[in-house]
Structure formats: C-alpha cells, structure tokens
Image: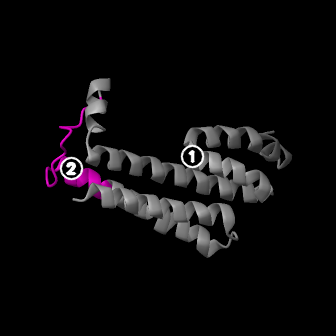
Amino acid sequence: MDWTLAFGAVNVIALIAWIVLIALPRIPALLSGVLYLGVGLLCVAYVLGLVTVLSGLIPNEGGGADFTTIEGVRAIFASDAGVVIGWTHYLAFDLFVGLWIVRDADAKYISRWVQAPILLATFLAGPLGLIVWLIVREPAARRQGRFR
C-alpha cells in the first residue's frame, strides 16, 4: 500500500470537511456531507488500514501492535502505516468533535465569528478546541435552562 498516498487522501478529506464547517453556510445537506463523507470516509480509511496491517495483508515495518508500553506505542508509530492509521484516527475524531461543536453552537445561537476560532483550534489541536468550546458553551446552555 502507498501510505504516502493514503496520508494525502485523508488530509484532503479532512481539510475539505473543515472548510465546509468553518466557511460555508450551515445547510443540512452540507452538515450531512461532513458527517458521512468526511467523518464516515475517515472512519472507513482507518478501519481498512487497521485491518490490513493487523491481518498481515500489508506488513507493518514497525512490528506488531503493543498498546501496553510506551515502547510498544512508539514502535507502532515508527512505521508509515502506524503514522497514517494513527493520524486518520485523530482526523476522524477531531472532525466529529468539530461537527458536534457546530451543531451545538448553532442550537445555542452562538455567532459564527465566535465559532470560527474554536473550530480552528479543534482542527489544529483537538482537545484544546473542545475545552474552549465547553467553557464558551456553559453560559449559553444555562441561558437555555439546560443546567438548572
């Protein structure tokens, strides 16, 4: 398998989906596209990569999967396959979190100008964007009576 090509493909899918989330109108068809064509394709790519490596169909030059030690995890990411599969995992989850933020923010009438930097932070450093969103959403959720 050409892991460089796979790496480029998952990056393009994620980038297009993030552009849709940040810059385009929030119409249901576009948000569904982000979910099914963005998150969905990234999940499929992740599973296919994982299955091909774990089944031995494509050798992982970094060795077997050992998630119990730091050395084992380092060995997983020492191969192109491990990097691409791990990166795809990050891309899929960060995009899913970004989509949740968009839907939650729109439901709480949070300005797109406030959402944009939070989404950018989620795109670049997933947990950072998520924690910022959780802090920002709290007052809006209280105004809607969700935390009484």
What residue lies at 32% left-to-right and 25% top-to-bottom? Answer: 70
Instruction: Label 1, secondary structure: give it.
Output: helix
Res. 53 mark:
2
In the rendered structure, which disc, 1 or 2, sits on the residue that comes first in sequence? 2
| Residue 50 belongs to magenta span | yes
Give the residue at x 61% y 66%. 20
Q: Is residue 83 visible?
A: yes
**Residue 46 against residue 67 in the figure, above or below:** below
Q: Residue furthest front?
A: 4
Q: Which residues are magenta?
A: 47-67
Whether residue 39 appears in this view of the structure is no
Q: Nearer the viewer, residue 10 or 45?
A: 10
Name the secondary structure under disc 2.
Answer: helix
Residue 83, x across and y down, in percent: 33, 45
Cα distance between the residues tagged 1 and 2: 27 Å
Asked if residue 41 is positioned above or below residue 77 in the image, the reply reads below
| For residue 22, side relative to residue 9 (left or right) | right
Mark 1 residue type: Leu
Check disc 2: other Cα within 10 Å, few if <14, some if 14-19, many if 20+: many
Along the line of sight, the residue nearer the viewer: 108 or 17: 17
Q: What's the residue type where badge 2 is placed?
A: Val
Label number found at residue 124: 1
Which image quarter holds the N terminus? Answer: bottom left
Q: Is residue 39 magenta?
A: no
Q: Which secondary structure type mostly characterizes the magenta part of the structure?
A: loop
